[in-house]
Amino acid sequence: WDAKTGDNLLSFKPPSPTAETAAVMPQLVDLAPVPGQDGALLVCTRSPELHVMSTEGEVLRSYKHAKADANGAPVYTACCLSPSGEFVYAASEAQAITCFAKDGREEGVAEDVHGAEVISMCHHPHSNRVYSVGMDGKICLTEE
């Protein structure tokens, strides 16, 4: 948005999770700027994949849940990045937080973080801690 005029300067459509839903706008649930990459955004749609996208709508990198190709793979509901952008964290509706390395490798999973769906996440600016907020009203701290 233009701060002075309020005009929309840019918009793009995140990729659809499947070919069958390509005509439907994916449900965007979280968005975060990628540190050190101008014009790159981490996009979380209600699917088993996260995407780093350019502001032109090009997918630069994707992060997939380990069970993404199987039926019943949990979908992501929130995401955040470490301050350096080296790690991507994603919360699934299965109440787990998955950590991915920048290159796409799955680094680990913290299970049963909340008793309900995670709706928001943020990374501590100086230590390896992720805070999450759940539909259960709790704020949880996950450390690695």
Image (cartoon, rainbow, N blue to C red):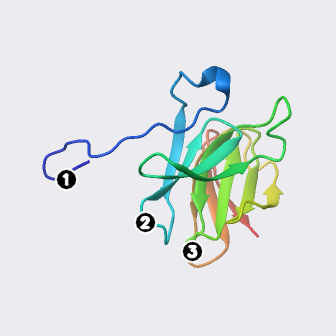
Residue in front for this viewpoint, 74 or 96: 74
Q: Nearer the viewer, mark 2 or mark 3?
A: 2
The vertical placement of 73 against 33, above or below, is: above
Q: Identity of the amino acid at label 3?
A: Ser
Question: How far apart, in angstroms, are the residues tagged by discs 1 and 3?
Answer: 27 Å
- The percent coordinates of residue 113 (x first, y second) are 75, 51
- The percent coordinates of residue 32 (x first, y second) are 50, 55
Q: Residues within 10 Å of mark 2 (few under 14, many from 20)?
A: few
The vertical placement of 106 against 127, above or below, is: above
- The percent coordinates of residue 24 (x first, y second) are 53, 22
Badge 2 vs badge 1, beta-carbon distance below 8 Å: no
Which numbered circle lies on residue 3? 1
Callout 3 secondary element: loop
Residue located 84% across and 29% down the image: 71
Residue in front for this viewpoint, 33 or 117: 33
Which numbered circle lies on residue 84? 3
Residue pointed to by mark 2: 38
Where is the C terminus found, in terms of image quarters? bottom right
Which numbered circle lies on residue 128? none
Q: How many marks?
A: 3
Callout 1 secondary element: loop
Question: How far apart, in angstroms, are the residues tagged by discs 2 and 1?
Answer: 19 Å
